[in-house]
Image: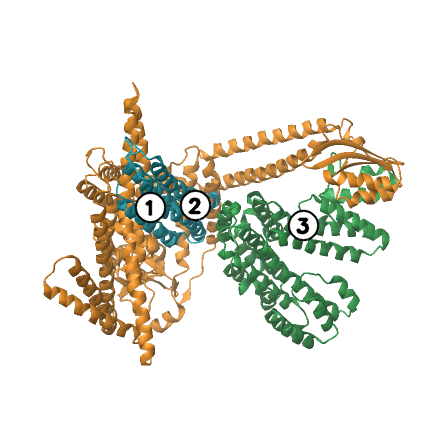
Amino acid sequence: MDILGIVLAFAGAALAAGLAGIGSSIGVSIVGQVAAGLITEEPGKFGQTLILQALPGTQGIYGLLVAFLVIFKIGAIGTLKAVTPGQGMAILLACLPIALVGLFSAIAQGQAAAASIGLIARRPEELGKGIIYPAFVETYAVLALIASILLLQGVAL
Amino acid sequence: MYNDIRYAYATGRIRSLQKDLVDETTVRRMLETPDEEAAFAVMMETSYAAYATGAGVSDYERMLEAGLIEAYRLVRSISPDGTLTDILLRRYDLHNVRIIIKAEHIGADYKHLIVPMGRVDPDTIAAAWHLRREGWEEGSESSHILPPASQISLPRWLERLLYRAALMIDNSGDLYLVDLMLDKAWFRGLKAWSKENSHYLYAWLVVRIDAVNIMGMLRLRAGGWSRERWREIFIEGGRVSRSKLESLYDLTPEQAAAGLIDTVYRREIEGGLEDYRKCGELSYMEALFEARLLEVLRAERYITFGSQPLLAYLLRKEAEVRALRMVMIGKLNGLPHDIIHKRLRAFLYR
Amino acid sequence: MAVAEMLKVRLMIHKSAMNEVISTLQSSGLMEVERLAGDNIESETHEHLDMLPLPDNINILTRLVSEMNYIVNFLSPYAVHRESLLDRLSPSRVPFSQEQFKAVARDYRHYEHTYDELFAIEKRMTEIRNESARLEHDIEELEPWRELGIPLGDVASTGRAMLLMVSVNEKRLPDLIAELERHREPFHIERISVFAGRVYFLFIAISADKEALAIIHKHDPVLWSFSPGTPPAFVKLNQLREELNHLKREMSEMEKQAVAIAADIDTYKAACDYLRLELERYTVLEKVAGTESVTVIDGWVRSKDADELNRRVHVVTPLAEVTFRNPLPGEDVPVSLVNSRLARPFEVITRLYSLPSFRELDPTSSLAIFFFIFFGMALGDAGYGTVMALLSLAGLRFLRLSDSGRNFLQLLLICAISTIIYGAYSKAWFGDLIFPDYDFVGGFITIMIVSLALGAVHLLYAIMVELYDNVRHGDRAAAILDQGSWLLFIAGTLLFSLSRVLSLPTAAAVAGNYLFVFGALASIYSMGRMQKNIPARLAVGLGTFYMSVTGFFGDLLSYLRLLALGLATGGIAVVVNQIARLFRDIPYVGLLLTVLVMVAGHIMNMTINIFGAFIHSTRLQFVEFFGKFYEGGGREFRPFSAETKYIEIIDKEGAG
């Protein structure tokens, strides 16, 4: 069995889950801190801020999803399949879109959501718009996820 | 990055607190009331009502002060950087130092002039001042100056200023120089701090310094003071340079205004001078500058989190207290509506 | 799909009946009272009306309301029963009977005493907090002097010797000593401790040596002084700590008092509500005008409620004239939405964006069907759908809900049904728990095509709504040129590209080609038609056309999120099951662990994905759909009513 191929595939899965997860945790933490400040003054806005805080969390899930797709693909749960270095490299590259876009878009989305907290602090009735702005950021994570999945599908083992 | 993540929590809180700042409509409503009782009733609808004790109108000053103190306390408690409030509060410490020194000189009672807002307990300042002035000279007998069971130590910057003030008085005995020194110390401290920590506050400070310099020049000129005296009060750091202002010192107000038109303060100077010609006082220009300062603060809106919203909240709160005080004083003294209105310009047309 | 018809209503009643009529208006909750505009009245009645003077007690009432608000706000953190998460999301109100409510309210004068009490407590708490902060500061300052054994009060200069307690930056001490040595007067430095980079020492020199003092001042010192009789630092520190503890005890005492008072919080809440209703009744008077004998009340009423309002007013007094008229163009008409029972829950989504203005279409029913499908696809697991359905049913059955809370749960229920349908079709029940052959990536390409197709339909529908809207407003030209040509182009494009993939009849393919070309030309023409000369028309037309085409495909790609979200739910669910099964072989506890991991994993996955499905289905409405035609900005119709904030009257008076 060629170890290098497996290692590269593992690296791809680790990057996808790891980087996107880092991005999401930073993003969620940013929103959480701003929200905590607001809630100290106005506990009634808890529900609204919770929605905003959840927004940057999805990138981590997308990353995890791609990681699992890789795991299934190479049979990491159960018996490992043979993966050539070339295939391993292809898997690693396929993971990069969601890993990188996940990392940066989650942080960016966290900032946008934090700004929306400022918005609902003053105009709670504008929650809908406050959700939309950060949700725009996520589009690119979604596109990256699709790209990663399509690329992974393209790797034949 | 514009955003400083350490301030995320504090910004979230401030965004909520901003709503409680007194808005234009409220000030306008206070202004349109027939007398101080009615104006006070409107004030009771604002956040300051929380500090009422039921004493009625006479309570307004204490309420305003309490509101401001609470704002500073709150911001200090949520700010990751405590120096942010301390540096602004130095102004009150310096005010107290000034009062204490003057009181000692004239030998008058000063307690009612003390503002209990500084970071250092005024009694501590007073005791320290007397100790430093007399204690070391005459020995231990003078420790009776200390209030019972007290412990005194001053922050370093204040210790230094007191020492310098003491030297100045020993050398020249001129209280005016001490005054100037304290004034400049505040600006210098703020300048040093904001250069390091907040470009936002620095931008505000530059306008503030210019306002003080420009109006200082016009006032001193009108009072027939010499150019040398003016040079002493000039504060470095503004956008309008010393040489520029100095070159205008001997001209008439109109000519001086013409000389300043090409600065960024065209609006304030033109508007202010027009009123100055009509009624001979600079209060309108002052109001215009106040409006300008509040305008500078607006950049805070585009900051997701950072120290800016905190600073803006405090500075706005101060402006708000000044405005409310102005209305109440105006009403108590029966000033005509339009005079108060003019002085409130900063608040009414932002 | 409707914004309710509104009528402007004017009540003219005899003054004697005014209070009763206002009470009726409040309890019936049918009419929104509007402030009478001065000019307006005079021109219509040819008689001068004055705004009615407000009664004096409005000030007292205002004060009482703010006091009660203060009481309730202050006490809520101390109230014994903690609010649950669900309570916070949709606060349930305290049940009160009409009789209890009135009884509580009658006693409101007693509550002023509570207000004073709480005010005193809060004041003392603030004092304690400040005092504690001061003590903590003193303790911190004194700590470095702990090792100095002599009474601090004795550290003072005598007639001949200068004795100072000083601290300077540790790094500056050598310089300081060097300078003092150069100065050649006797001195002594007794180091006590080093704390946070500063060295604390006793400085002894000759009293008259002003120079030594100046040298010390050059090095940024902090000086300490203590009043005579101050004990040694360690004793003083203990004293300060003792005081601090004392304050802490007092603080918890204060908190206990607050908790004790908070036991009655429901009573205060009721009183607060009662007073607020009273105050509202009085503030209506601000909007009312009248002559000596007649009072005029203006406002808005839903057309369907007009007769009922008329009847209710006449029940109270025969001396009343109620007139209705249709809204005039340009008038600011409040908006109330009317939708079928099935679409009503989706008003939540519309409201989240903004109410339609009175003259606009209500998008609720159009978005309902799409939202229904989108949510189902995005969540896509029948198991989760079932749990969601059960939870929302339970909520509807057992929680005390406001109207909006009820609508929201109904919306969740409907979405759950959609999820169950979609999930059952794709065999997803908690991932692959029930059907081991469930393959979450299997239908990838199909779902992708379905997502895009749905997107295309959604977008085309939006253009048609826009077209309809233009026609409704009589702007036929815009309807044909803007939306018509664009629709032709898109239809052409679809036919054209489909004919490449599928085998369509030749006629369709040819028609597609012509439509494609004609639609494009027409679009370019219509997009540039506002410009004056031909080159500008061409440039603007081409530019806008290019932007529109890329925009359309950008929008289309956005619908891929349905695929992504569905995949995420399914993928993680499968993984949860896989991991859980790893525990199965552990002896004895294997089964238990498997179940635990599954339950925890699925709860987490479900929560996150319900959030995600909701947010993204909403986003597709707001951005891709509303963006084409919807503006919003309507003002909600808020009838003057007896709506309570904290409590709920369980036996409301019936009609009449």
Q: What amino acid is found at the position of numbered circle 1 in the picture?
A: Ala
Amino acid carrying mark 3 in the image = Arg
> Residue at horizontal 67%, vertical 33%?
C139
Residue C530 visible? The answer is no
Closer to us: mark 1 or mark 2? 1
Instruction: Check the image and report above or below for C143 versus B170.
Output: above
Q: Residue C109: horizontal and vertical position, in percent?
A: 47, 42
Residue that mark 2 sits on: A27
Q: Is C18 situated left or right of B320 in this image?
A: left
Chain painted in orange in the figure: C
Q: Nearer the viewer, mark 1 or mark 3?
A: 1
Q: Secondary structure at mark 3?
A: helix
- According to the colouring, which chain is green? B
Are the residues under marks 1 and 3 on the same chain? no
Q: C432 and C106: which one is in front?
A: C432
Q: Label for residue A94?
A: 1
Given the image, on which type of amino acid does mark 2 rest?
Gly
